[in-house]
């Protein structure tokens, strides 16, 4: 008997980090700015100060339930700021930037930088506050996911990052520039919320990251190191001196290509189910219409890029829930066992240097998709060959092999087959 498997793939900036999210943070700052400033300057707290901090934390958690988060559009952010010191910080920053550079830095970016500073103060006060803010901002969406899984009889679910924060550096940049938490941490917050509501459904976060692909690392290495930075800080700065990087694809076409194949190859194993028993639906959410359009047009015109048995649903989301997908695409292709190499092939066919992690690509605009399809090697033929010869190791990579530094020459294998 086949089982329904749901793979939830949300974007974060502008999507899960939406107007409601920022409205709630700003409301906390409007009411507790002075206290948070004082807390940020304290190295140690006396017993009486610690007791007061606990009382403030309790008050904030109760106040959050009373804030109005209706009609919270991201564009209205500046109008929500009422504390005079907060307003002055923005004015002062604009004055320091000067008239020449004002066109290079927006008010929204300045607010984001200030919010990042104060999120640190809030987390020092109590991380439960930011946890509650994030879940409140997306409460309707998470409840919708849970209800939908119950109605459709989903037995297993996984969460994957649909953001372009596919490396530690991209996540840090997003946190510092946009004034948010870490999407890696918040994805686990969603997992906890779903598991608390759906006791009988298996739900897991899958540690997929594009940085593993571009750095030739075993799947999950980058994700694990990023969580180590946030969950087990050593108090002396970052735990790791270097993290893997990922190439930023504005269209997310390469990201979704990797995900639809990774789900069949790796995520189903994490959920302890074989592909022959699974009806897979991937639910992708983004606030950018240009991204939804790029993904929709690419995969609807070329459904052979998605494995047979996989359904891709595309949803717009910026805090306002829309229950039905704007597009549904049924996969008609084979599993790409070499999707890691083919993601890099996409970048190279766009004229990109794989060692250049500073610039961005747009696969939707730059890639000759027909040429890519005729050039890629999926590993399916190789798999059939080796299935008929038990005990002989296959040549293709699925992402569970040792890293290149551990003795596998991935680049040589890639050149050989392509």
Image (cartoon, rainbow, N blue to C red):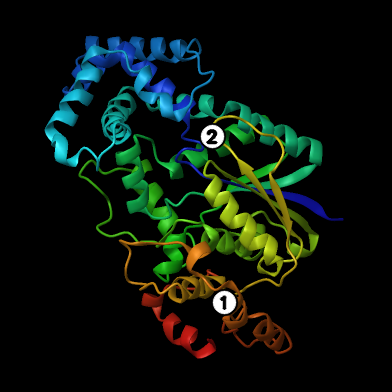
Q: Are marks 1 and 2 in contact (CB under 8 Å)?
A: no
Q: Secondary structure at mark 2?
A: loop
Q: Vertically, is 34 above or below 43? A: above
Residue 377: image quadrant is: bottom right
Q: Is residue 384 left or right of residue 288?
A: right
Q: Nearer the viewer, residue 268 or 172?
A: 172
First of labels 1, 2 by sequence position = 2
Q: Which residue is mark 2?
A: 318
Q: Nearer the viewer, residue 221 or 111?
A: 111
Q: Nearer the viewer, residue 164 or 251?
A: 251
Is residue 387 at all visible to an observer of this figure? yes
Q: Vertically, is 366 above or below 105? A: below
Count of residue discs: 2
Q: Residue at x 42, y 82 (%)?
A: 411
Q: Residue at x 68, y 67 (%)?
A: 302
Q: Position of residue 48 (x, y in %)?
A: 23, 9
Q: Position of residue 128 (x, y in %)?
A: 42, 25
Q: Quadrant of the N terminus?
A: bottom right
Q: Residue at x 57, y 76 (%)?
A: 372
Q: Residue at x 48, y 49 (%)?
A: 163
Q: Vertically, is 76 above or below 229? A: above
10 Å crowding of disc 1: few (<14), some (14-19), many (20+):
some
Q: Is residue 243 left or right of residue 237?
A: right
10 Å crowding of disc 2: few (<14), some (14-19), many (20+):
many
Q: Which residue is mark 1?
A: 372
Q: Secondary structure at mark 1?
A: helix
Is residue 131 at all visible to an observer of this figure? no
Q: Position of residue 148 (x, y in %)?
A: 74, 36
Q: Position of residue 356 (x, y in %)?
A: 32, 68
Query: Which mark is on residue 299?
Result: none
The outermost residue toward the right is 1
């Amino acid at each position: 008997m086949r089982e329904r498997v749901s793979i939830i793939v949300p974007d974060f900036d502008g999507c899960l980090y939406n107007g409601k999210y920022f409205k709630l943070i700003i409301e906390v700052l409007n009411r507790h700015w002075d206290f948070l400033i004082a807390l940020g300057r304290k190295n140690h707290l006396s017993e009486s100060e610690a007791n007061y901090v606990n009382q403030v934390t309790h008050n904030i958690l109760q106040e959050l339930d009373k804030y109005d988060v209706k009609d919270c559009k991201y564009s209205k952010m500046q109008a929500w700021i009422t504390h005079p010191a907060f307003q002055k910080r923005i004015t002062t920053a604009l004055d320091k930037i000067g008239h020449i550079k004002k066109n290079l830095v927006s008010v929204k970016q300045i607010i984001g930088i200030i919010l990042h500073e104060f999120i640190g103060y809030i987390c020092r006060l109590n991380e439960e506050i930011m946890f509650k803010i994030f879940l409140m901002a997306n409460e309707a969406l998470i409840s919708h996911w849970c209800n939908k899984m119950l109605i459709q009889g989903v037995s297993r679910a996984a969460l994957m990052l649909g953001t372009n924060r596919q490396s530690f550096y991209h996540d840090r940049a997003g946190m510092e520039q946009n004034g948010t938490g870490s999407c890696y941490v918040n994805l686990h917050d969603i997992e906890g919320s779903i598991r608390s509501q759906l006791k009988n459904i298996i739900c897991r976060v899958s540690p997929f990251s594009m940085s593993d692909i571009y750095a030739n690392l075993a799947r999950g290495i980058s994700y694990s190191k990023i969580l180590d930075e946030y969950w087990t800080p050593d108090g002396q700065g970052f735990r790791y001196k270097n993290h893997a990087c990922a190439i930023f694809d504005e269209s997310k076409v390469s990201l979704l290509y990797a995900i639809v194949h990774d789900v069949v190859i790796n995520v189903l194993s994490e959920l302890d189910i074989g592909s022959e028993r699974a009806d897979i639906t991937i639910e992708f959410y983004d606030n950018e219409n240009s991204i939804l359009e790029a993904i929709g047009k690419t995969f609807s015109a070329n459904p052979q890029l998605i494995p047979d048995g996989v359904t891709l649903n595309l949803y717009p989301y910026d805090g306002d829930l829309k229950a039905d997908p704007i597009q549904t695409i049924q996969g008609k292709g084979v599993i790409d066992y070499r999707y890691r190499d083919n993601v890099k092939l996409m970048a190279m066919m766009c004229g990109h240097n794989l060692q250049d992690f500073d610039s961005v690509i747009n696969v939707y605009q730059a890639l000759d998709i027909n040429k890519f399809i005729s050039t890629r090697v999926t590993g399916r033929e190789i798999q059939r060959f080796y299935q008929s010869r038990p005990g002989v190791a296959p040549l293709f990579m699925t992402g569970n092999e040792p890293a290149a530094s551990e003795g596998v020459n991935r680049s040589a294998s890639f050149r050989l087959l392509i």
